[in-house]
Image (cartoon, grey):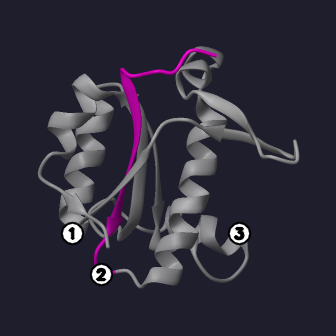
Amino acid sequence: MVYNETHKFVAVINKDVEIGKALNAIAHSVAGLVSLASEGEKEKMSFVDFVDKEESVHKNISGLSLIVLRGKNNEIKKLRKSLIENNVLYTDFTETMTGDTYKEQLEKTLMTSEEEMKYFCITAFGSKEILDPLTRKFSLWH
């Protein structure tokens, strides 16, 4: 596999969300992101197997960085709109997707307007040329 230098992963975490919830949100969101990717996009995601000294294989890890940023809820909403406008592959995770059963989470989401939505995170994969200007204003998450 050829290493891809033109594309990247990015995640923006809501800076008001506590770390445990943020980690849960990013895990769900990245899993969804990869599941949505076409075969061509998956190729650009540069998944490789890492082999250690004892020849034990650590399978299917992207050779690309996943940059984790932080922002406010309204900034994540604006980024989501920009990702849609630029046809960038993305997923998001909201407060309505937590607690209870998944059926209750679906119902909570259905009953929440976009304006009321509290985003825990958004993840995206795309060309650096498009993503860099869209995410430049966010700071690194720490």
Q: Mark 1 points at which residue?
A: 72
* Residue 18 within the magenta-colored segment of the rendering: no
Task: In the rendered view, tell whether residue 36 sits above or below residue 99.
Answer: above
**Disc 3 marks which residue?**
102
**Are dots 1 and 2 in contact, CB under 8 Å?**
yes
Callout 1, which amino acid? Lys
Which residue position holds label 2?
16
**Callout 2 environment at 10 Å: few (<14), some (14 to 19), or many (20+)?**
few
Question: What residue span does the magenta drawing correspond to?
Answer: 1-16
Residue 50, position as x, y percentages in the image: 72, 39
Q: Are marks 1 and 3 in contact (CB under 8 Å)?
A: no
Residue sitting at x 39%, y 22%: 5
Instruction: State the image quarter where residue 46 is shown.
Output: top right
The span from disc 2 to disc 3 (Cα, nearest Å) is: 23 Å
Label 1, label 2: how many angstroms apart (C-alpha)? 7 Å
Disc 2 versus disc 3: nearer the observer: 2
